[in-house]
Amino acid sequence: MLNHVTTHSLDVVYHLNMLNIFINNLRITEPELKDELLEYSTITKHKKGDFIIKNNEYIKVLKIVLQGKVRVYQANEDREILIYYLNTMETCTLSLSACFEDCKSNVNAIVEEECTILNIPVRFVRDWNFKYKSWNTFTTNTFRKSYNHLINQYANLAFQPLKDRLFDYLVSKADRSIVKKSHQQLARELGTAREVISRLLKNLEKEHKITLGQKEIIILEK
């Protein structure tokens, strides 16, 4: 019994600490909103590869990334279209909009790096938008940031050659100049065929921008 109480107490302390980080980052000032967040939200942990949002399922809770990274994408047969990545203190705009319309998700969201997620039931997401200025600011900023990102994505798709997009993508995913992704993964995430990616990677290697290793790609030029 003591172990159960101790574990429960630790969970409460962890919830409070993570919630305070969220509240401070969003500059939430309304005491009532703080109280409702504490009462109605939950915090969950997810490992790499976990789905936190699935296509064609109703959105029941809004999920906000407190720690970690999540990839949001659309899938069509064996191809994927990357929509965006969610980082600390970010939420999926498409899921946020679904909260206001009571509709199904049209994207998948999968954990790329171990995540801590704040979960808020949909009904509060809607209500708080009208009740609390700081929450309204959060949702407005989320929509605006996502809109700007999608406009930039469209511009890249329309005007930037795939080879340049591939290189920029590799640079953005590199950890100490190393990318650990297969050609098939890159093809899915950039919405093209594996053969195309393999050809473009070989061209980039000939241009001395990368080196192709065993299950890794080394960035030589940034």
Image (cartoon, grey):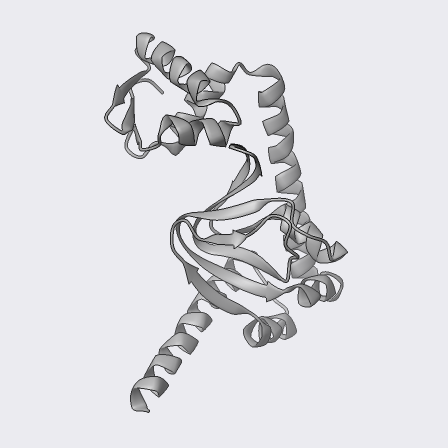
- Residue 172 x/y as whole percent: 41, 31
Residue 179's x, y, as percent? 32, 30
Residue found at the far top of this picture: 206
The residue at the point 61 percent across, 74 percent down is 36
* 165, above or below 120, in the image: above
Q: Is residue 194 above or below residue 110?
A: above
On-image quarter of the N terminus: bottom left
Q: What is the number of callouts on the image?
A: 0
Q: Is residue 171 above or below residue 136?
A: above
Quarter of the image with the C terminus in it: top left
- Residue at position x 31%, y 35% in the image: 175
| Residue at x-position 64% and y-position 74% | 32
Give the farthest residue toward the front: 77
Residue furthest bottom as drawn: 1
* Picture residue at 62% right of the left edge, 41% below the top: 145
Where does the image place residue 87, in percent across and percent down from the top left? 47, 47
**In this view of the protein, which residue sits in the foreground, 118 or 217?**
217
Percent position of residue 146, x then y? 62, 40
Is 161 in front, or is 31?
Answer: 161
Q: Is 215 positioned to the left or the right of 38 in the image?
A: left
